[in-house]
Image (cartoon, grey):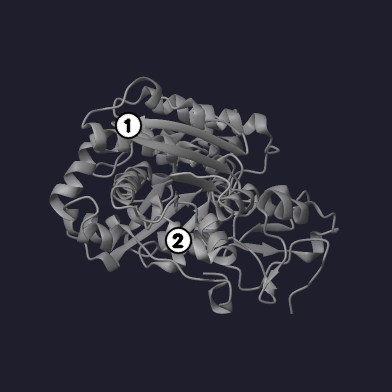
Amino acid sequence: MVSVSDKRVNISQDNPSIVFDKTKCDECGICKNTCKFNVGVYGYTNEEYACINCGSCTIACPNKCLSEKDETDKLKELLKSGKTVVFQIAPAVRVSLGEEFGIRPGINVEGKVVTAIKKIGADYVFDTTFGADLTIMEEAFELVKRIENKGVMPMFSSCCPSWVKFLEMFYPDFIDNLSSCRSPISMQGAIIKNYFSKIKNIDKDDIVSIAVVPCTAKKMEILKFDDINLAITVRELARLLKEKRINLKNLKNSSFDSLMSKGSGGGIIFGTSGGVTESLIREVYRILYKRRPMGRLLNFNEVRGLSNVKEAEVTINGTHLKLAVVNGTGDARKVIEKIKNKEIYYDFIEIMACEGGCIAGGGQPRKYVTTNSLKIKRMKSLYKSDKKMKIRCASDNPDIKMLYNGFLGEVGGSSAKRYLHTSYVNRKNNSKQKNI
């Protein structure tokens, strides 16, 4: 039986992302308030516990009685499987993992992360910013086509699985507003199993695909597809490295492996609230103007920062876009209700469940209190990396061009639809769909 309380969040035993240890809990109520007000979820749906798997409660819990489902033992087994082990590293991981090893918050340790993962047995280590570039290629194209064809508007972003589940559970009438694009890790997982395997002449069933993520909800998301074998959080990776006496601080830098080595600067900023929108606008500009954006649209400050709802307007070659970035699902309810009542209108809305985006995800380090100051340090680090990149737009990435030319065909075409897009379910009255 699950221990039930009205003073804390209630976690089902079959929750694929989060576990609860009653022996550590003093029912302080912090997790409940975090879920109720920041996430906007706490309660029940169809007599079951409402959970979007975001893990915000695990960050907030002072006693660590709420935690991610620890799958480090499964990770060890996969590393010993004898198969080709391929890792991908999400953008926000590089500016947080170092904190677990005494490195100052916000320092970009991507090179050290690659070295560490090779040390534990990875054959290949890829950067999920490549998957973010794929997402933007497809999502920008989808937005332009919706505008041209007078499709369902506003279009919602779809790369945050907790936000997607939130909408499926509470606002299923808006499912058609969601972009059909898979998330970056899911797109990259599909390409690893179906393209990389062919290039390397490896049976895709002989590839173990592992994603290192800042988010507990990715454990839930990967159950929907068969492209990724395991999603581990920053905290899980840190535990394994410490167990193996690998100190990130002492490691030299290594580069990501080729073919899916890196994405653009726009892919890097996917890890922060507003990053998806900023990357999207760069690519929409490229589609509509046939040239690279400059100035304001290359550093789109209106959508940066930690405000609850950030708004911006831009006109690109005669196409006027009204944009919103919602910083947490707690505020998503307010925005959706206003849309329902026709009080506001947007063309595109980015929503992330965690306040600050993936840099404050539920699988991030708990070594430091996740204050706004910490979030800003992580965010600034990603923006700094973006600014240093020679390639800042997805369509300028030569590996992206090679993938479309040699495998996917046209952006938004039949192969892209097969590997890079998805559909959604109405979870409101379907108890079997609560956790996957």
Q: Nearer the viewer, residue 121 or 301?
A: 301
Q: Is residue 218 left or right of residue 105?
A: left
- Residue located at (72% from left, 48% from top): 60
Q: Pinpoint residue 345: horizontal percent, then vertical percent.
A: 50, 45
State whether residue 258 is above or below residue 30: above
Q: Are marks 1 and 2 in contact (CB under 8 Å)?
A: no
* x and y, in percent, of residue 187 in the image: 34, 55
Q: Residue at x 45, y 50 (%)?
A: 154
Residue on which the image places disc 1: 316
Q: Examine the rendered structure and indicate whether residue 170 appears above or below residue 163.
A: below
> Quick check: 178 left or right of 18?
left
Q: Amino acid at mark 1?
A: Ile
> Going from the N terminus, do you reach mark 1 or mark 2 first?
2
Element type at mark 2: strand
Task: Answer few, some or many: residues within 10 Å of disc 2's Cα (few below 14, many 20 plus, some between 14 and 19).
Answer: many
- Residue 263, by quadrant, is top left
Residue placed most toward the observer, 387 or 174: 174
Q: Which quarter of the image is occupied by the N terminus?
A: bottom right
Residue 230 numbered tag = 2
* Residue nearer the viewer, 268 or 275: 275
Residue 116 image offset from top left, x and y in percent? 44, 42
How many other residues sit within 10 Å of disc 1, few (<14), some (14-19) or many (≥20)?
some
The percent position of residue 381, horizontal first and vertical second, equals: 50, 28
Identify the residue at image location x=55%, y=45%.
Answer: 344
